[in-house]
């Protein structure tokens, strides 16, 4: 069994780069001035949105991460050490994420977990990069979270990402014989922008065509009536519509498309997932999207492992998970535990290297390799394809892609 040591003082030194001299003093005092103290716990700081518009994407993955931490601790911990989580609400606010990240780093955390969004996570991840503390977004989709250069080599994402999601939607649709598409692009966040770009690139790589495209601002009060008017001019030339968006805007746009009498198949990314989609779209038909799994509100993906995850989550939090994003938090801790187990130190650079040298881990949806030296996210995760029809979501199949298109945008995960 490894005897892990942490050097809190070495983490604190880099906080000078983000202007927190007072916090350095506090951190050094907390460490007792000894840079090689043996410790009996691993501390994970979780800067997540418990409130605000990102809470639906942060709360359940965060809960699922805590569930897995409890399971690990009950089984004896990691290399004999218990895992302790410090959870702080960042209120879906970019500046607060940066502030909370700095607070957590000053408390001597070994790993930082940031929100399920690149835009929201960026400042916290940059602060962790300066302090050489590995930072993992619990489920950010934009590939810039994982390219090692935009934010830095200590920054990771525990998601397959919008490049994989957009590409998977295109690949699956093409296999259905749908080769011509209309792209309706939500411009509100980086995730939706990149989902649309990679969808188009993959479809064209396969030999399909994006006949037309349009955009809308997204958000809570979506009105795509003008976009629908333009869409109707191309409706006879397309096999399907790809809606690169997130809820509630995605669900509202889909409802408006169907209310306008357009019954063309609609495909979208994982951010359509959850009960909220059904609440808004009602009994629409022929809508497909690519979540991470199908459980609880979604039927047909038979899996003892998924059933156990849902049952254990429900027992701990008195309600089942309402989206498949919850599973990403659970799987993230599985991957982090494997990396921590292989490390001989809790120093940031050692942990980073251990994460980059990760092997495949077993998750409730099968094996997945999380990180490599050049790509700090998952690329081999199969996504579920589900169908929305008559107010219900049903599993269609799992679908994997043979690679992410190279758009020349610096995405080191592309091939």
Image (cartoon, helix red, strand yellow):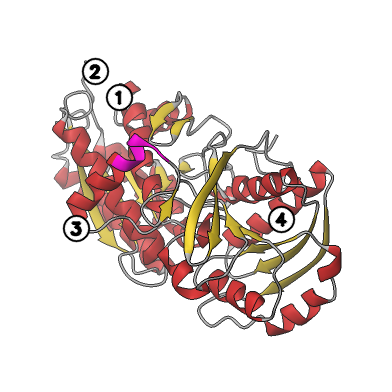
72 inside magenta stretch = no
Residue 218 relative to residue 350: left or right: right
Q: Nearer the viewer, mark 4 or mark 2?
A: 4
Report the residue marked by disc 2: 2
Residue 75 relative to residue 18: left or right: left
Report the residue marked by disc 1: 341
| SS class, disc 3 | loop
| SS class, disc 2 | loop
Asked whether the beta carbons under mark 2 and mark 1 sit within 8 Å of each other, the answer is yes
Report the residue marked by disc 4: 197
> Given the current orientation, which residue lies at the most extreme front position?
390
Q: Is residue 324 above or below residue 332?
A: below
Q: How many marks?
A: 4
Asked whether the beta carbons under mark 1 and mark 3 sit within 8 Å of each other, the answer is no
Q: Residues within 10 Å of mark 4 (few under 14, many from 20)?
A: some
**Mark 3 or 4, nearer chain start:** 4
Q: Where is residue 289, by image quadrant?
A: bottom right
Distance Cα–Cα, label 1 vs label 3:
31 Å
Q: Where's the C terminus, which quadrant? A: top right
Task: State which region is magenta.
Answer: 302-307
Q: Position of residue 363 (x, y in %)?
A: 39, 33
**Mark 4 or 1, nearer chain start:** 4
Q: Position of residue 342 (x, y in %)?
A: 34, 21
Distance Cα–Cα, label 4 vs label 2:
45 Å
Of helix, strand and loop, which mostly describes the magenta segment? helix
Q: Nearer the viewer, mark 2 or mark 1?
A: 1
Q: Residues within 10 Å of mark 3 (few under 14, many from 20)?
A: few
Residue 318 is marked as 3
């Amino acid at each position: 069994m490894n005897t892990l040591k942490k050097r809190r003082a070495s983490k604190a030194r880099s906080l000078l780069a983000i202007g927190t001299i007072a916090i350095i003093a506090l951190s050094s005092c907390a460490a007792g001035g000894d840079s090689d103290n043996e410790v009996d716990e691993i501390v994970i700081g979780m800067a997540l949105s418990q409130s605000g518009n990102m809470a639906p994407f942060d709360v359940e993955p965060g809960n699922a991460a805590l569930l897995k931490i409890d399971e690990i601790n009950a089984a004896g911990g990691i290399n004999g050490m218990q895992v302790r989580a410090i959870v702080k609400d960042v209120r879906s606010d970019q500046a607060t994420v940066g502030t909370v990240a700095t607070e957590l780093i000053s408390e001597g955390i070994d790993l930082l977990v940031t929100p399920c969004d690149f835009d929201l996570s960026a400042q916290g991840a940059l602060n962790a990069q300066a302090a050489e503390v590995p930072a993992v977004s619990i489920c950010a989709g934009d590939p810039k979270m994982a390219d090692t250069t935009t934010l830095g080599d200590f920054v990771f994402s525990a998601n397959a990402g919008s490049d994989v999601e957009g590409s998977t939607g295109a690949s699956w649709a093409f296999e259905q014989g749908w080769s011509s598409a209309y792209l309706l692009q939500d411009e509100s966040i980086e995730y939706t922008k990149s989902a649309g770009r990679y969808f188009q690139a993959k479809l064209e790589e396969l030999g399909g065509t994006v006949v037309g495209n349009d955009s809308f601002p997204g958000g809570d009060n979506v009105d795509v009536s003008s976009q629908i008017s333009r869409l109707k001019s191309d409706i006879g030339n397309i096999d399907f519509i790809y809606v690169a968006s997130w809820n509630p805007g995605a669900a509202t746009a889909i409802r408006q498309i169907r209310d306008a009498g357009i019954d063309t198949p609609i495909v979208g990314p994982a951010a359509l997932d959850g009960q909220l989609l059904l609440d808004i779209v009602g009994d629409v038909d022929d809508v497909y999207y690519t979540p991470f799994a199908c459980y609880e509100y979604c039927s047909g993906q038979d899996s003892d492992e998924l059933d156990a995850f849902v049952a254990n989550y429900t027992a701990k939090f008195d309600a089942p998970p309402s989206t498949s994003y919850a599973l990403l938090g659970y799987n993230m801790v599985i991957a982090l535990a494997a990396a921590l187990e292989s490390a001989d130190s809790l120093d940031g650079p050692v942990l980073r290297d251990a994460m980059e040298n990760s092997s495949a881990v077993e998750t409730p949806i099968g094996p997945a390799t999380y990180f490599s030296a050049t790509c700090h996210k998952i690329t081999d995760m199969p996504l579920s394809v589900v169908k929305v029809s008559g107010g219900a979501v049903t599993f269609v199949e799992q679908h994997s892609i043979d690679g992410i298109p190279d758009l020349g945008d610096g995405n080191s995960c592309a091939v």
